[in-house]
Image (spheres, helix red, strand yellow):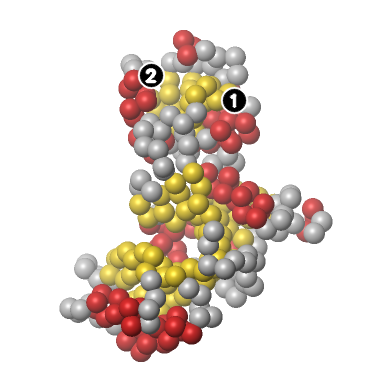
């Protein structure tokens, strides 16, 4: 595929965010050398770009190991968008102390980052940069950009952003909790052909109850148990219709082409208000 016709990827900007890094990782897996990367100001805008055909793909974070599910992504899947999940990529989150190429630690007067970046490096900041004030900015990428332009500013972000903006990684892996990861979904317009292959599949669902009643969750779980399907994840979200009214997001092992998955979904469709298949895709 030529550069002029390279597929486009919408992601939560600015350039240098973990979303940007995940978009490039997906492009690499698809064999796309020069993808068109489209920055978006919000996750909803990423979904809109895909739904309206402005980009072929979108990349959205779904869950972080420390912070939990990304509610803006879940709400778009459930209530706003018809986009389908085409793939999943898990990114290791490693925060770095980022500085101007010519700066020393004695030059640093302020440490800036996204609130999550500051929060996830609190112990390091207290031990190594005690007494230096912190300031929140819109993204970890913005902190790298500011550090690259000002010797008195240190940022907390990823090494990718530091390289992108011409800053220097003073110290890597400064996060308080090791093993932090974020899962990202590659999304495409409803009906998009599969683009990734594999031997192990996962199917993501949004399940809406007819009415909130005792045993509703047990009924859902039982259908998968009867079919011999393993649940990877289940979580509830408010339907935004009434207080105490919930729907469920479920990830199961298997593909919608598997007979046992088809059987379970058909049984659930008889008992639930809606069974929305968000995607059936290979997992690494």
Please state if 20 lies on the left or on the right of 155 as rendered.
Answer: right
Q: In terms of image quadrants, where is residue 4?
A: bottom right
Please state which of the two labelled residues, at mark 2 or mark 1, is closer to the viewer. Answer: 2
- Report the front residue among 128 and 155: 128
Relative to 82, say whether 138 is above or below. Answer: above
Residue 68 location (% of width, % of height): 35, 52
Residue 160 visible in the current orientation: yes
At a point 43% along the width and 16% down the height, the residue shown is 109
The circle drawn on residue 167 is 1
Asked whether 195 or 103 is in front, the reply is 195
| 163 and 110: which is toward the camera | 163
The residue at the far left in this view is 214
Kindly report the distance in space between the C-alpha atoms of the residues bearing marks 2 and 1. 20 Å
- Residue 59 vs 271, above or below: the answer is above
Q: Earlier in the sequence, mark 2 or mark 1?
A: 2
Question: Counting other residues with Cα less than 10 Å from the Cα at mark 2, is it few (<14), some (14-19), or many (20 or more)?
Answer: few
Give the labeled residue for mark 2: 128
The percent position of residue 196, horizontal first and vertical second, equals: 63, 65
Q: Is residue 256 left or right of residue 211?
A: right
Q: Are discs 2 and 1 less than 8 Å apart at CB?
A: no
Quarter containing the N terminus: bottom right
């Amino acid at each position: 595929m030529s550069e002029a016709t390279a597929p486009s990827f919408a992601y939560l900007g600015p350039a240098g965010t973990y979303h940007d890094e995940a978009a490039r990782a997906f492009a690499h897996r698809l064999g796309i050398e020069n993808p068109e990367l489209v920055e978006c100001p919000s996750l909803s805008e990423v979904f809109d770009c895909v739904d309206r055909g402005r980009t072929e793909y979108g990349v959205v974070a779904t869950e972080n190991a420390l912070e939990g599910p990304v509610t803006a992504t879940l709400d778009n899947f459930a209530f706003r968008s018809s986009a389908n999940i085409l793939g999943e990529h898990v990114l290791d989150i490693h925060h770095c102390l980022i500085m101007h190429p010519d700066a020393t630690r004695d030059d640093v007067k302020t440490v800036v980052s996204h609130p999550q970046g500051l929060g996830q490096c609190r112990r390091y900041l207290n031990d190594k940069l005690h007494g230096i004030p912190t300031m929140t900015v819109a993204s970890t990428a913005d902190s790298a950009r500011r550090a690259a332009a000002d010797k008195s500013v240190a940022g907390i972000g990823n090494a990718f952003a530091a390289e992108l903006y011409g800053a220097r990684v003073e110290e890597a892996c400064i996060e308080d909790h090791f093993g932090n990861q974020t899962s990202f979904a590659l999304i495409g317009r409803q009906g998009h052909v599969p683009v990734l292959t594999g031997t192990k599949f996962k199917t993501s669902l949004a399940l809406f109850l007819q009415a909130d009643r005792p045993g509703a969750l047990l009924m859902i779980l039982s259908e998968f148990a009867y079919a011999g399907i393993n649940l990877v994840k289940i979580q509830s979200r408010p339907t935004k219709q009434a207080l105490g009214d919930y729907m469920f997001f479920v990830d199961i092992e298997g593909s919608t082409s598997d007979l046992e998955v088809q059987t379970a979904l058909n049984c659930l469709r008889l008992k639930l208000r809606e069974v929305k298949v968000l995607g059936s895709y290979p997992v690494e």
